[in-house]
Amino acid sequence: MTKLNTNDTICALATPPGSSAIAVLRVSGKDSFKVSGKIFTAKKKGFNIREAETHTLHYGSIGTKDQIIDDILLSIFRKPHSYTGEDAVEISCHGSAFIVQQILTLLLDAGCRMAQPGEFTLRAFLNGKLDLSQAEGVGDLIAANSKASHKLALDQMRGGFSKMISGLREQLMQFASLIELELDFSEEDVEFADRNALKKLLEEIRSEVQQLHDSFAEGNVMKSGVPVAIIGKPNVGKSTLLNAILNEERAIVSDIPGTTRDAIEDTIVINGLAFRFIDTAGLRETGDRIETLGIERTYEKIRQARIILYLFDITSTDCMEVKESLEEFKRQLGEEGMKDKHFILIANKIDRLVKIPRHFRNMVEFECIFVSAKRKENISMITESLVKAISMDQAEEGVIVSNARHHEALSAVLEALNDIDEGFKKDIPSDLIAIDIRKALYHLGEITGEISNDDLLGNIFSRFCIGK
């Protein structure tokens, strides 16, 4: 985002482009009423837009003296009681692309300029209507595609996370003020701060920051969806299973082994939580260069996955082969790569059996579900198992961090707090401890935007859609 003139009056389409029943255009800035008054004619006689009360709706036509474009509803928002904190107008018109373009042209001719992506929300931030974390919550709310991601974004937009960060900053500020006071009287060797009390306060702050930091693992899953990799040997029915779970023909199904050369992804929402399914290339030794690349990507996807559905053909696979395959995964991924992975074994093609072999029923060490992907038998058991595999207890209580930028800042805060703790243990001078306290305060301030720069703001708000 290039440096913007926030004194300009801006306009943009706030609803998605294309034909629709209605469209909404936004105008914000000091000349919003002046600009809108040039092109709006109210049905009510004697109406003066500059005297209209805030949060009122007015019916009339929009256009020029020579041509009426449309009959519209005009919403008035007086500063600071608007989304941006500025004087603002919203125009609700019919959703014809031609009408929208004509109205935008009239607004530009009357003195507006087109808004950049995220500029309305940027102005809300600059005018103190939202802090930076809340502004990012707005973007997440627009992108939410499940109940879980919607709840996270709404909580963040309403300031739940911001209040917690502000509370932590306030505690640290008290901490810092006592240390700074000692520095003012350093020559007199005076201690204003009870070191035991400070250590206790530090531990409380660090515990809260650590909890927020650790919640990112769940928060990121809730926001982006749970990555689920479907793996197994060629021609065991992985693509058929994906189609059955999604209830649509998403992947190509063929009896020819090695048909899937690359990962196929799609998302489904189950019980309010999004799951991102990845159908991968079959795992086998092959001389085909393209298929080999596909298998390498399969292992990449397995590393990224939270849940792994290992699919095998029950008519031609025994327990020992399944165990050997799992051992191979452990070898390929390593101890770190296997961390936090949840394996679910899926025995496919039960429609070809008279009864399920007893030795598979005795696989108590593994969770094993018996299905027919072709006939869509027992598919609901897989979706039920997926939901159980993801613990959502934390989502019901406390604040959850779902933003990577916030997680990175919290990591820096933890590092500074650990340095303060080490400083106390080694009895280092107060001025060095004060440096680490300032670092922690700085990184907490980065989250809410109390400390920010143009590059950071540009990076955040440029990801928003135009009109927001």
Image (tube, rainbow, N blue to C red):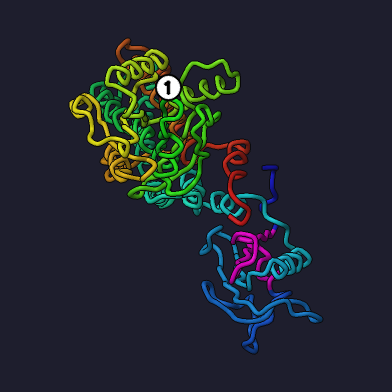
In this picture, residue 286 sits left or right of residue 110: left
At label 1, which amino acid type do we have? Asp
Magenta span includes 282: no
Image side of residue 457 versus residue 249, left or right: right
In this picture, is 50 found above or below 395? below
Locate the N terminus and report the quarter of the image it occupies. Answer: top right
Q: x and y percent of residue 194 in the render?
A: 25, 24
Does 260 appear above or below 274?
above
Residue numbers of the magenta segment: 9-36
Identify which residue, 29 or 285, lies in the foreground.
285
Decide whether residue 24 is among the magenta residues.
yes
Residue 152 visible (yes or no): no
View extreme (top): residue: 426
In the picture, residue 311 is in which quadrant? top left
Q: Residue at x 60, y 38 (%)?
A: 459
Pinpoint residue 79: horizontal percent, then vertical percent: 56, 64
Tell me the quadrant of the picture where the C terminus can be found: bottom right
- Residue closest to the eye, 26 or 435: 26
The kind of secondary structure element at disc 1 is helix
